Image: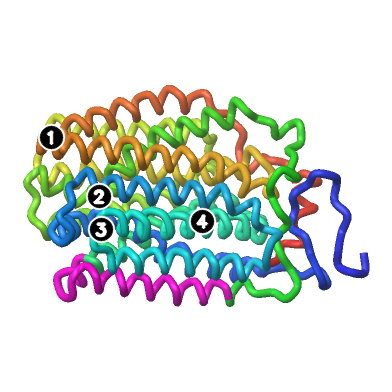
Amino acid sequence: MGDGRRATPRGRADERVVNGAGVRLRPWRALAAGTALNLPLGSLYAFSVFLAPLESLLGLSRADLALVFGLAAAGFGVGMNLAPSVYGLASTTTLVLACAAASSAGIALAAAAGGLTQLALGYGVLFGVGGGAAYILVQQIVNLAVTRRQGLVNGYIVALYPAGAMLAAPAFGWAVHAFGVRLTLGGLAAVLAIAGAASGALVARPGVTLAAGGAAAVPEPRERRRAAFWRLWVVFFLAASAGLMVLSQAAGIIAAYGGATGLAVYGTTFIAGTIAAARLAGGWMVDWLTIPAVATGAHAVAVAGNLMLTLWPGPGVAVLGLALVGLGYGLISGVTAAAVAVYWRRALYGRVASRIYVAWCLAAIALPIAAGRLFDVTQSYATAVLIAGGGNLLGVLVALGLPRERAASRPATASSAAAQPTTSS
């Protein structure tokens, strides 16, 4: 194929070369681009640091701010599911820059917000949609560029969000105290713009684009794994419900159990760091262990954290208990990202992952908002913690039925081989 194109079986969704000879994006460039783009977007998980300042500045309730976080999660879901359908509309660099621009503009609007509507539109809609599209875009690029250690690689990509929160939480706490919440959000908008430009430069390749991953991407018969999809979806939803309650309101929960402001901020940082490490570990473990074994253990760890906080409420126990809930959620996040690469071929990664991540969006809307409302009514998170624990216990049972296929033993398919030489941006 002298023009750099290569015939693929009908219905395949492999990457496509347009207007040029076939080139391959180097794995390190794909990983660096993903790091630059997703790390600052992970500040979403440090939203709890803004709870008290925004309540004071805008006169909002805890439930109002939980709604903003829920809208951001819904926006992420919309962006995630839009991303595979726009692969072929522009170069990968253009898509990356568009995602960064939407996210940066959303945070800038939130910084200037005078009330709930502007805050929800900026942080909840623009930041959410841009971030969600970027998340799936990066995962698709990386899964086509990197062909080894799929579990570890996917664990690393999803670990970037809580790692970003781990860096952002103390930075936000300091900046809010020194400059106020508006300038802090304005600074975040600038960081997102710079990071997006750097990521766009890293994936730049002339004349090459991702093929559209919409309806044309028809799975092979062995990949029509509806039962596995829905079981994985439920396992992820139950873990994310508890984990996102923790991430969205960690500082508020620690304070509600008697923790001082410093403990709340640095406890949030510790929890975010725990989740980041767990996501990386969850993906790596899939390279060596069965998916149901890792997923079952992860939910069991989260159950232990909820039980600990219920039986021995207090500020120190709150940090440790929430960290265990976050550990379970992080492991499940890494397992889920790796499981998509194990159960389905790489060219379908973005399309399948975006649908599974709808569970994340619904989880962020459901329990975090309910927890915020329960706190407004009772001034306690005890009931929300019990609900989260029940969900994790159910997650143990559902995870036991996941397919036992291992990444290390998965044979290379013709479709996988077809994707590798044209991994481009």
Q: Which residue in the protein does label 4 denote?
A: 135
Q: Position of residue 96 (x, y in %)?
A: 56, 67
Residue 269: which disc?
Answer: 3
Q: Do the residues under discs 2 and 4 have CB atoms within 8 angstroms?
A: no
Q: Earlier in the sequence, mark 2 or mark 1?
A: 2
Q: Do the residues under discs 4 and 1 have CB atoms within 8 angstroms?
A: no
Q: In which image quadrant can residue 317 be found? A: top left
Q: Which residue in the protein does label 2 denote?
A: 65
Q: In which image quadrant can residue 107 be found? A: bottom left
Q: Do the residues under discs 2 and 3 have CB atoms within 8 angstroms?
A: no
Q: Residues within 10 Å of mark 3 (few under 14, many from 20)?
A: many
Q: Which one is in front in this view, the residue at disc 4 or the one at disc 3?
A: 4
Q: Which residues are magenta?
A: 173-200
Q: Taking 52 as reference, is 340 above or below it?
A: above
For the residue pair 208 and 139, the one nearer the viewer reads as 208
Q: CA distance from mark 2 to mark 1?
A: 15 Å
For the residue pair 377 and 356, the one nearer the viewer reads as 377
Indicate the quadrant containing the C terminus: top left, top right, bottom left or bottom right.
bottom right
Q: Which one is in front in this view, the residue at disc 4 or the one at disc 1?
A: 1
Q: Is 366 positioned to the left or the right of 154 in the image?
A: left
